[in-house]
């Protein structure tokens, strides 16, 4: 019997849990991957998972507090990723990968990706950025395979990553200036856009994530 891939959607009241779970299950189905998708706040479940997905919407500080409020949950994510478990952060879940967030004060992030989450600099443009925007690839990566020419993701945000390292950038989008859209460090990656709302592009990224075998581990 083929063993099912276990996918943990981390529940810290960060939003978009059900839609992220449905998208992960659909990506597995379309790829012919046997998968068990669970929405969980159990540290034991997170440590045992084959893949970890951290969704998020709202303010960085609120999401960080939500994660810290569940005993052992953040440590479980850190333990699992240090051991090599692939991790995908979505929207604020990606932002939490940074060193700090500057929304509602300064709040510590995971520190996997250099830089901070700060207000977007887009004079004359509507905030938050809301809608479809093209992804511009900075470097090839297994997570972006099969996306074709000029893929678009669905964005909803007014804060973004700044002062990061070029080697962390997989893709950017343009909204007044280049905005980090996909970042990666070893076995941890994140998308500023909502993959679960990005239709075929999002499903392809999730399918790639389920088959991703990182060559290196996060170096933080």
Image: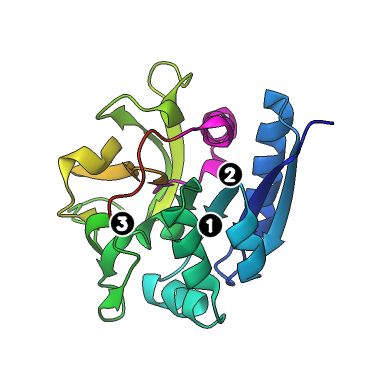
Q: Does dot 3 land on a helix, a strand or a loop?
A: loop
* Residue drawn 29% across the image and 63% down it: 111
Residue 207 in the magenta stretch? The answer is: yes
Q: Report whether 53 appears left or right of 36.
A: left
The answer to whether the residue labelled 1 contacts the one labelled 2, judged by CB atoms less than 8 Å apart, is: yes
Residue 67, above or below 29: below
Q: Which residue is mark 1?
A: 55
- Gap between marks 1 and 2, in whole Å? 9 Å
Between tags 2 and 3, which lies in front? 3
Locate residue 51 relative to residue 132 in the image: left or right. Answer: right
Magenta region, residue range: 189-213
Reading the image, the residue beneath label 3 is 112
Task: Read off the residue under disc 2.
Answer: 196
Q: Which part of the image, by quadrant, shows the C terminus?
A: bottom left
Give the number of the mark in front: 1 or 2. 1
| Residue 16 can be seen in this image | no
Give residue 164's position: percent from left, percent from top.
18, 51
Residue count near mark 2 (Cα–Cα under 10 Å), binned few <14, some 14–19, many ≥20: many
Relative to 95, does residue 214 appear above or below in the rendering?
above
Look at the image and tell me whether residue 73 can be seen.
yes
The CA span between labels 2 and 3 is: 23 Å
Question: Which residue is pictured at 76% across the width and 37% down the height?
Answer: 3
Quadrant housing residue 131: top left
Q: Main secondary structure of the magenta part?
A: helix
What residue sits 50% from the left and 57% below the top? 80
**Of 195 and 1, the residue lying toward us:** 1
Task: Indicate which label's residue lies in the foreground, 1 or 3.
Answer: 3
């Amino acid at each position: 019997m083929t063993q099912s891939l276990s996918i943990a959607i981390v529940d810290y009241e960060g939003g978009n849990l059900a839609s992220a779970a449905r998208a992960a299950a659909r990506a597995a189905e379309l790829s012919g991957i046997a998968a068990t998708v669970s929405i969980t706040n159990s540290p034991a479940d997170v440590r045992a998972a084959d893949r970890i997905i951290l969704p998020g919407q709202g303010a960085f500080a609120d999401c960080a507090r939500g994660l810290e409020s569940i005993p052992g949950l953040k440590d479980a994510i850190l333990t699992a990723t240090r051991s090599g478990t692939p991790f995908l952060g979505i929207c604020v879940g990606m932002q939490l990968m940074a060193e700090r967030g500057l929304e509602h004060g300064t709040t510590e992030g995971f520190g996997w990706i250099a830089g901070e989450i700060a207000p977007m600099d887009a004079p004359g443009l509507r905030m938050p950025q809301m809608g479809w925007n093209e992804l511009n690839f900075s470097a090839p990566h297994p997570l972006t395979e099969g996306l074709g020419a000029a893929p678009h993701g669905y964005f909803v945000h007014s804060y973004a990553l700044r002062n990061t390292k070029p080697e962390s950038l997989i893709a950017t989008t343009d909204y007044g200036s280049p905005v980090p859209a996909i970042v990666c460090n070893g076995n941890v990656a994140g998308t500023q856009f909502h993959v679960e709302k990005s239709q075929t592009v999002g499903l392809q990224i999730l399918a790639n994530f389920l088959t991703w075998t990182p060559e290196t581990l996060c170096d933080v």
